[in-house]
């Protein structure tokens, strides 16, 4: 049993069966996920309480691969030393880990050439991070999507063989294609099932043999209905089964009756060369009901103004989506599994603990 990380509410217990763990492990070994073989050396920089380290220890046993366990030594310097000496072929961690690793390698160097693939999930992977790993470190980051309730693998962002250019990168930076064994659908207002056309937006629901149907001692009808799991993620599914997420249902910003994607703003901000981390949350507004608050961590030694960041965003989003409230932090607060803790950011804003600039 693992507990959810509680990023949008109280943690809930998810009970796995032996059957679901076995089938999920088989999925992890397949070519569409990790293509594991006995010669692989797997480095899961993921604690076991985070959805059983994404099932990788079980998949390693099933495939005959070796495991490299970093214990508590998950800072960039320690991980680079481990990679250089032990030569893993596949690694997995949340985006914040790989962001720190990239910054360390830029400053101190590092040989990551043994890694053929990095699985990255837990939260949206900034496209700038995927492209930087490919260009600077020659390492492929593959984004995967899932949650504690899905064991966690539900989709993997491997582009179709024929994809080229911008289309290739659109698939690479999506939440991925639903893996064999997992069904998905898009549900709109009034539980209306929408088309898989890549355009219709609604809540993503999934079901499958390794997806839970209830929480421990809590059936929670708001999350489970008609055999489907309401994931809490908002987005589209296209004709090929690729998911594009716009936000979490509890993180989407509804401003003046229009929706603003916090994830989109975060990815754009983290694409700025002077920004290390960025988290955007909805805060109350007397006129528009909600407006975005951008919390930003600046790279060491760099200086950047709110005006510069707003100009950077304005090249990609309309003016009404630009945040007027900004807070520069030494570090974005994170949950135990390395996700941005937006619940805590909202609480700090409400209590007046954040120094906020308005522009």
Image: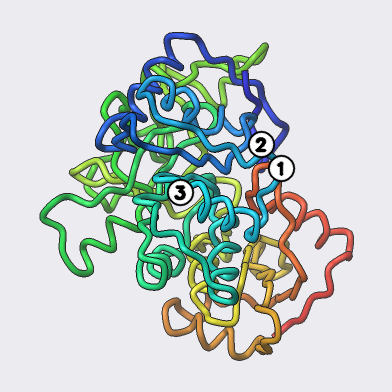
- Few, some or many residues within 10 Å of mark 3 (<14, 14–19, 20+): many
Q: Is residue 256 above or below residue 181?
A: below
- The picture places residue 96, in percent across and down from the top left corner, at 59, 57
The Cα atoms of the two marked residues, 1 and 3, are separated by 19 Å
Residue behind mark 3: 87
Taking depth in this image into account, of 17 and 195 the one nearest to the observer is 17
Q: Which is closer to the viewer, label 2 or label 3?
A: 3
Asked if the residue under mark 3 is in contact with the one under mark 2, i.e. CB atoms within 8 Å, the reply is no
Q: Secondary structure at mark 3?
A: loop
Question: Residue visible at 68% across and 68% down?
Answer: 293
Quarter of the image for the N terminus: give it: top right
Of the numbered discs 2 and 3, the one sitting upstream in the chain is: 2
The number of numbered badges drawn on the structure is 3
Q: Secondary structure at mark 1?
A: loop
Question: Could you tell me which quadrant the C terminus lies in?
Answer: bottom right
As measured in the structure, the alpha-carbon distance from the residue carrying label 2 to the one carrying label 3 is: 31 Å
Q: Nearer the viewer, residue 214 or 197?
A: 214
Q: Residues within 10 Å of mark 1 (few under 14, many from 20)?
A: few
Q: Position of residue 234 (x, y in %)?
A: 45, 46
Chain-order first, disc 1 or disc 3 = 1
Circle on res. 5: 2
Q: Name which residue lies at 50% across and 80% down.
A: 313
Q: Is residue 262 left or right of residue 190?
A: right
Q: Is residue 97 left or right of residue 127?
A: right
Q: Position of residue 30 (x, y in %)?
A: 28, 30
Outermost residue, front side: 85
**Left or right of 212 on screen, residue 192:** left
Residue at position x 59%, y 82% in the image: 274
**Can you see residue 331?**
yes
Residue 72, labelled with which disc? Answer: 1
């Amino acid at each position: 049993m693992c507990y959810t990380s509680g990023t949008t509410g109280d943690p809930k217990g998810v009970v796995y069966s032996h059957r679901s763990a076995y089938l999920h492990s088989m999925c992890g070994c397949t070519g569409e996920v990790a293509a594991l073989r006995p010669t692989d050396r797997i480095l899961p920089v993921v604690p076991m309480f985070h959805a059983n380290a994404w099932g990788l220890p079980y998949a390693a046993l099933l495939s005959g691969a070796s495991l490299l366990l970093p214990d508590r030594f998950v800072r960039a310097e320690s991980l680079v030393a481990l990679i250089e000496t032990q030569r893993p072929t596949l690694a997995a961690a949340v985006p914040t880990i790989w962001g720190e690793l990239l910054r360390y390698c830029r400053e101190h160097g590092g040989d990551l050439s043994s890694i053929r693939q990095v699985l990255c999930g837990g939260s949206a992977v900034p496209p700038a991070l995927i492209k930087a790993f490919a260009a600077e470190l020659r390492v492929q980051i593959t984004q995967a999507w899932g949650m504690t309730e899905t064991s966690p693998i539900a989709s993997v962002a491997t582009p179709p063989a024929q994809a080229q250019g911008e289309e290739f990168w659109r698939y690479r930076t999506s939440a991925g294609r639903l893996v064999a064994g997992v069904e998905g659908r898009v549900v709109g207002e009034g539980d209306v099932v929408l088309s898989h056309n890549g355009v219709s937006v609604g809540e993503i629901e999934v079901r499958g043999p390794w997806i839970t149907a209830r929480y421990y001692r809590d059936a929670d009808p708001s999350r489970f209905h008609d055999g489907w799991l309401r994931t809490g993620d908002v987005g589209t599914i296209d004709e090929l089964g690729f998911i594009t997420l716009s936000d979490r249902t509890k993180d989407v910003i509804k401003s003046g009756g229009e929706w603003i994607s916090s994830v989109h703003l975060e990815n754009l901000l983290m694409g700025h060369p002077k920004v290390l981390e960025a988290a955007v949350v909805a805060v109350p507004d007397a006129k528009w009901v909600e407006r975005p608050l951008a919390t930003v961590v600046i790279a060491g030694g760099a200086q950047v103004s709110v005006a510069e960041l707003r100009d950077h965003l304005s090249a990609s989003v309309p003016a009404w989506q630009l945040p007027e409230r900004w807070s520069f932090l030494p570090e974005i607060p994170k949950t135990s599994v390395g996700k941005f803790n937006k619940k805590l950011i909202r609480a700090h804003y409400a209590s007046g603990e954040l120094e906020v600039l308005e522009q």
